[in-house]
């Protein structure tokens, strides 16, 4: 069996072209969720941003629907296969659906 070790990136190493990255971050704060309607099928979703970081920096993590309930302030998580989006010039870490 092939045993592949997961390589983690630090927050400081993230940039606007980062994709398929793994980061270990602590949740600093989570904003109140807001409701948005999907452009593709008009379904209603919850979305929020969490401020997350490691010893090298902080970044905003976008959370959708059930992801919001899976994260708690003060806890550390391994976020895998994530990517960066730029929204109004600010980097947002995203986890694929």
Image: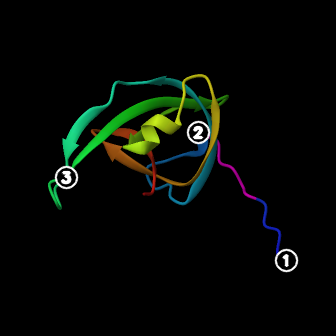
Residue sitting at x 45%, y 31%? 50
Q: Earlier in the sequence, mark 2 or mark 1?
A: 1
Q: Calculate the distance from the C-alpha at mark 1 to the C-alpha at mark 3.
A: 42 Å
Where does residue 39 sit, x and y in percent of width and height?
16, 56
Q: Callout 2: 10 Å neighbours few (<14), some, many (20+)? A: many
Query: Are the residues tagged 1 and 3 within 8 Å (C-beta)?
Result: no
Task: Tell me the CA gap for discs 2 and 1.
Answer: 31 Å
Q: Which is the main secondary structure of the residues drawn in magenta? A: loop
Q: Determine which of the numbered discs, if any, sits on residue 43 in the image.
A: 3
Whether residue 55 is visible, yes or no, is yes
Camera-near label (2 vs 1) is 1
Nearer the camera: disc 3 or disc 2: 3
**Side of 81 where 86 appears, left or right:** left
**Residue depicted at 65% across the width and 48% down the height:** 9
Q: Residue at x 27, y 45 (%)?
A: 45
Q: Residue at x 45, y 57 (%)?
A: 96
Q: Secondary structure at mark 3?
A: loop
Which one is in front, 84 or 71?
Answer: 71
Sequence-wise, which precedes: disc 1 or disc 3? 1
**Nearer to me, 97 or 22:** 97
Of residues 77 and 86, the one drawn nearer to the viewer in this rendering: 77
Is the residue marked by circle 1 packed among few (<14), some (14-19), or many (20+) residues within 10 Å? few
Of labels 3 and 2, earlier in sequence is 2
The residue where tag 2 is placed is 11
Question: Which mark, residue 1?
Answer: 1
Q: Nearer the viewer, mark 1 or mark 3?
A: 3
Image quadrant where one finds the C terminus: bottom left
Residue 75 rendering spot, x and y as whole percentages: 63, 28
The figure's colour scheme reads rainbow
Residue 91 image offset from top left, x and y in percent = 41, 41
Bounds of the magenta segment: 6-12
Cβ–Cβ under 8 Å for marks 2 and 1: no
């Amino acid at each position: 069996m092939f045993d592949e070790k997961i390589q983690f990136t630090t927050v400081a190493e993230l940039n606007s072209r980062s994709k398929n990255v793994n980061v270990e971050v602590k949740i600093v704060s989570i904003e109140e969720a807001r409701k948005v309607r999907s452009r593709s099928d008009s379904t209603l979703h919850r979305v929020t941003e969490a401020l997350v970081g490691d010893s090298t920096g902080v970044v905003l993590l976008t959370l959708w629907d059930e992801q919001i309930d899976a994260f708690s302030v003060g806890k550390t998580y391994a976020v895998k296969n994530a990517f960066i989006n730029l929204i109004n010039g600010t980097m947002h870490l995203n986890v694929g659906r």
